[in-house]
Image (spheres, rainbow, N blue to C red):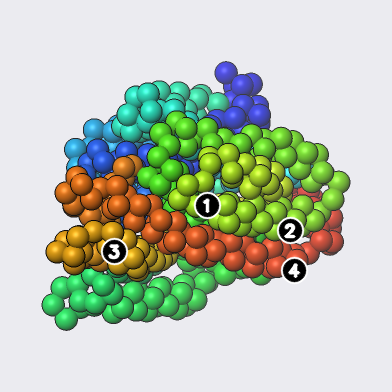
Amino acid sequence: MTNVRNHPMAALTVLVLAMFMTLLDLTIVNIAIPSILDGLHATLDQVLWVLNAYSLLYAVLLITSARLGDIYGPRNLLAAGIAIFTAASVLSGFAQDATQLIAARALQGVGAAVLAPQGMPLMMSIFPVEKRGAAFAAYGTAGGLAVMAGPTLGGLLVTHFGWRWIFFVNLPIGLLTFTLALLLVPDLRSGRRHRLDLFGVALATLGLLGVIFGLIEGQRYEWGAVYGPITIPEIVAAGLAVLVLFLVHQARHQRGEPLIPFAVFKDRNFTLMTLVMAALGFAMLGVYLPLTIYLQSVLGLSAIDAGITIAAQPLAMMFASGVAAALVQKVHGKYLLIPGLLLFAAGVGYIDWAAHADSSRWSFLPGLIASGLALGFVWTPVFSIATRDLKPELAGVGSGIVNTIQECGGVLAGAAVGALLQNRLAVALHDRAVTASAQLPPDVRERFVAGFSHAARTGFEVGAGQTGASLPPAFQEIAHFVFTHAFVDAMRPTMLLPIALVVVAAAATGFARATGSRRAVEVLSQQEAVA
């Protein structure tokens, strides 16, 4: 058993499996959104919290758990995180209403946050410098595949077993991964004493919570008062102010053990890749949130049909990842990453352009294939560029920062894209309802328009087959026409936001250092030889 435990590839397999499980859960839930909406009678803003309760806790606790990994050993934190995540998955599957599901998803986020940042320090410890690029490429490719495979697997489970099984499926995977982690991953400790910045954790949590709550709930409260004199803009502003206070607090504690040691940002490539990861985190959720609702609620596809439609993307990514893994050994990753990001933006742009209320499911195939090929050239080099020159002692916190910023991108996407989608949907529903009401008798026109115009106040219900308003059966065909066309009107400008951020990320990648890394690798090799 000792030989097996000390085998780097065996440990890497466990790390990839654990990471695959948590990242799969980010997108597997998206395909089930319409079914969850119907099954729990939830509203769109409640389902946004189902997504963001996970992402918010994940983002806030990543850096803290990276520090805990330094104290108690990354292997032990990995196993603990898997156990929490698996238990929370079972609770999510048994949820009886939206509130219970949100709470269970928040606990899932805690488990994912505990295990996620342990992978990078373990890989930097068990792999020599010259083999780390291939290890990170495998890690990044598997992560991208997990994100992309979610809709297909989720569609299969939702269609044949129900939405609860997207959570129950984690039980056997979690038990297997937990056992393998204890058997195959070495228990490595730095031997140094560490401390936690609990005040910093509190500030980051409160700040993010204020911003995310304000963005998600803004449309419901019409961007006005929430409770007494407290308004949505005031909550968002307070959250931003607390985040600024968090950064000031971190700056004053750089000589101790801050949650964010600013030293990691002295490495230009690391800093730029954190921005790229934030854009990718934003783009992935920002695209899939409206797209999966559109495929089922507008085009009327079943969950499995929607998953199969999207499946072209991960298949293309699998093909491209193999090519990119070979090329990344020959050319600098930036020359793969820039065209990959631009092609991804172009592919998503094509999907957005092809979206109509009566589009064929195959209309999106060129965009899905293009964006999938692009992601193969994105996930492979991005981690390698970020960590290539990073000092070993900063590996753990660096992992926490990269994952935190990526996940913050996803959190902001769920909030910002959700807020923009709800805002545009409110306007589009009113405008489409006014136009369509001309087909109705004069005495019901006002009630018809009011039903759509006031939908935002009670929460949008956009599950499969819903219209967004309670109307007599005789008017359902017209109401469905209003909803489907209004949703497309709202979705198309909403998807421009993640596209724009990916283009900005491609431009930022152009400033990454393409030379000068060989000396850094030599220094790291010498340090390890001495150690």
- Residue 438's tag is 3
Instruction: Kindly identify which residue carries mark 1.
Output: 355
**Left or right for 444, reference 36:** left
The kind of residue on which mark 3 rests is: Ala
Instruction: Kindly identify which residue carries mark 2.
Output: 338
In the structure shown, which secondary structural element does the residue marked by tag 3 occupy? Answer: helix
Vertical order, 145 against 461 (above or below)? above
Please give the name of the residue rendered at 30% of the width and 52% of the height, measured from the top-left corner. 478
In the structure shown, which secondary structural element does the residue marked by tag 1 occupy? Answer: loop
Q: Give the CA separation, mark 2 to mark 1.
A: 26 Å
Of tags 4 and 3, the one toward the viewer is 3
Please give the name of the residue rendered at 64% of the width and 21% of the height, measured from the top-left corner. 3
Residue closer to the observer: 243 or 121: 243
The kind of residue on which mark 4 rests is: Phe
**Left or right for 481, reference 257:** left
> Which numbered disc flags the more N-terminal residue, 4 or 3?
3
Instruction: Kindly identify which residue carries mark 4.
Output: 511
